[in-house]
Image (tube, rainbow, N blue to C red):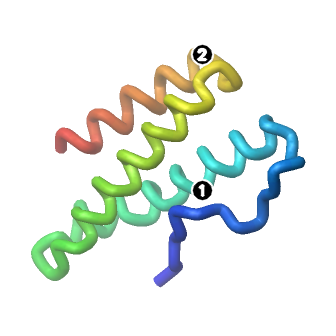
Amino acid sequence: MPQFDKWINDLSAIDPVGRVARRSVRLRLEAVGYYLPLAAKHAGENIEHVHQLRVWTRRALAALDLFTELLPKAEEKWFRKTLHKIRRA
């Protein structure tokens, strides 16, 4: 089981904001992608999968909010809509 960390340790204050945005959004979406099938198929075995999915969707949405001006509008809108649907399900 991979360990996802809310902190991104391989970035520094001198990294370009575009790199920080890409890394932040990508890592959070990877965590959502990992927990989504677990929550959908194994929630009865371990409710923690559902909890982690909700946590990582919330973090992904926060990253989208933070970096919205740097993301392509169509992609940002699609990710935001999809993440909201996942959280409601």
Between disc 2 and disc 1, whose residue precedes? 1
For disc 1, the marked residue is 27
Residue nearest the observer in this picture, 37 or 79: 79
Three-letter code, disc 1: Leu
Q: In what element is the residue under mark 2?
A: helix
- Tell me the crowding category of disc 1: few under 14, some 14 to 19, or many 20 or more residues within 10 angstroms, Cα based: some
Q: Is residue 33 left or right of residue 57?
A: right
Q: In this view, does 14 lie above or below 42?
A: above
Residue at image position (18%, 39%) is: 88
Residue 73's tag is 2
Residue 81 percent location from the top left of the image? 37, 27
Q: Is residue 11 left or right of residue 78?
A: right
Q: Is residue 23 above or below residue 49?
A: above
Three-letter code, disc 2: Lys
Q: In which quarter of the image is the C terminus?
A: top left
Q: Is residue 64 above or below residue 4?
A: above
